[in-house]
Image: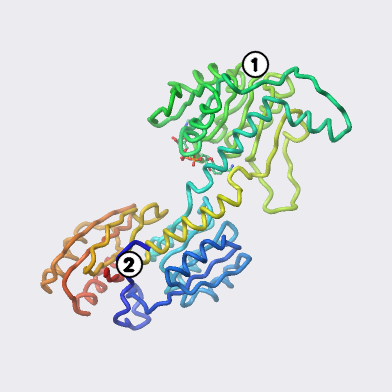
Amino acid sequence: MLPGCARRSAPAWPRGMGRMTLDTKPPLRALLLENIHPDATARLTKAGYAVETRKGALSEDELIAALPGVSLLGIRSRTNVTERVFAAAPDLLAVGAFCIGVNQIDLAAASHRGIAVFNAPFSNTRSVVELVIAEIISLARRLPEKNAKMHLGEWDKSASGSHEIRGRRLGIVGYGNIGAQLSVLAENLGMSVYFYDIADKLALGNAHRCGTLTELLESVETVTLHVDGRPGNSGLFGDAEFARMQPRSLFLNLSRGFVVDHPALRRNIESGHIAGAAIDVFPEEPNGNGEDFASVLRGLPNVILTPHVGGSTEEAQQDIGEFVAGKLTDYLSAGAASLSVNLPGIALPAVPGTHRLVHIHQNVPGVLASINQILASHKVNVEGQLLGTRDDIGYAITDIGTAYSDEVLAQLHAMDVTIRFRTITCD
Ligand SMILES: NC(=O)c1ccc[n+]([C@@H]2O[C@H](COP(=O)([O-])OP(=O)(O)OC[C@H]3O[C@@H](n4cnc5c(N)ncnc54)[C@H](O)[C@@H]3O)[C@@H](O)[C@H]2O)c1
């Protein structure tokens, strides 16, 4: 919870008034599904929420039955939060996706009902980077082959084809959160780092920025992909790109499955052009544990295949639990929407002794003027104010120092454009 702010325990607004949510008497209820890390429960409990946890996901009907009276919902990837669910959950203020992806949530429906959605986009960055480092070393030392032979009872102590990574050239495609952190760690291990990104990115350490993907491919001995999932990246890497790479290079993809042409990768490994590969993401992945895994890359030498576990560590889960729970409590206690997936990401420092009006509305001209006109007509002075917009949603936080009447709240609520409105008291 941001310091200094408390939910206002004041006037009970009659249920059924729809869009207006005045502060409810604590404890507010939080429902956490899908075995979310206990640190999330601890953090929410400490912030004063009554937390109910369930191990599994809920179906749409089960969710609808469970949500009345719940202000915060926590899910992972297997619970779908649909328009029907949002429509049946008038008390819901925010949803926390305790994971990276948010495809399971109807974000437009959430926005149009004034429900904030948060996720944890950075919590597993370090986990991915560590796996990449481990795999580069494993491939350079041909560990997959040595390990397989040992399990077959074959002793092969040859140094042929095994290399140190010190002094070798690493090419990072996509210099975002993961690519940039990898750059630092790889350089610390003595690698020379080259990177290519379509956006302007500051080179960290001694990393060399390449002007084109081709320049990168021709410069390095190991290529690792860390691009995002924009549609244009589909098929980014195929025969032409492999052909540009130096003979006997290593190749890794821990970004998105659809980025790489897997039959092309197989051909390049079989021909010996690519000396080893590590692949964590696939164009089609099984839906759950125990299901069959089909891939043209199975059965190849010096190829590490992992079931999309780049970011799957206990540390990442713990960080996700802490991070998302923090976002949820900050949003409820202070209206802070930084890093929200669907609302404008604004936040205003709390000023003790003020009341905060949190107003989610349709993004049309003149809303701020209308809010301020209502306040002025009741002689309510504005101490601080911030407006953010995102697509067709506007989000205004207004701090007022003087006491206000229920009439002010009623008028703000009655504005045609109001989607959701609540108040917070900052002590
Ligand atoms: N394997 C896993 O378990 C795992 C875990 C976390 C993230 N990921 C994936 O890793 C990828 C990177 O994650 P991130 O957090 O670093 O993302 P990010 O958004 O911070 O960085 C992606 C970078 O790629 C760049 N980019 C996009 N398309 C490009 C292209 N065609 N050529 C060059 N650069 C391009 C972007 O400009 C951006 O800088 C994402 O696809 C993410 O989904 C996988």
Mark 2 nearby-residue class (10 Å; few <14, some 14–19, many ≥20): many
Of the residues tagged 1 and 2, which is closer to the observer?
A: 1
- Whether the residues at callouts 1 and 2 have beta carbons within 8 Å, the answer is no
Which structural element holds mark 2?
strand
**Is the shortest distance between ligand 1 and the CB of mark 2 under 8 Å?**
no
Residue identifier under label 1? 247
Asked if 259 appears above or below 77 in the picture, the reply is above
Q: Which mark is residue 419?
A: 2
Instruction: Report the front residue among 82 and 53.
Output: 53
Asked if 299 appears above or below 314 in the picture, the reply is above
Which structural element holds mark 1?
loop
Residue at 32% x, 58% y is 393
Percent position of residue 57, x then y:
61, 65
Asked if 232 appears above or below 275 in the picture, the reply is below
Instruction: Report the front residue among 127 and 280.
Output: 127
Quarter of the image holding residue 309? Answer: top right
Q: Is residue 139 left or right of residue 73?
A: right
Percent position of residue 216, x then y:
51, 21
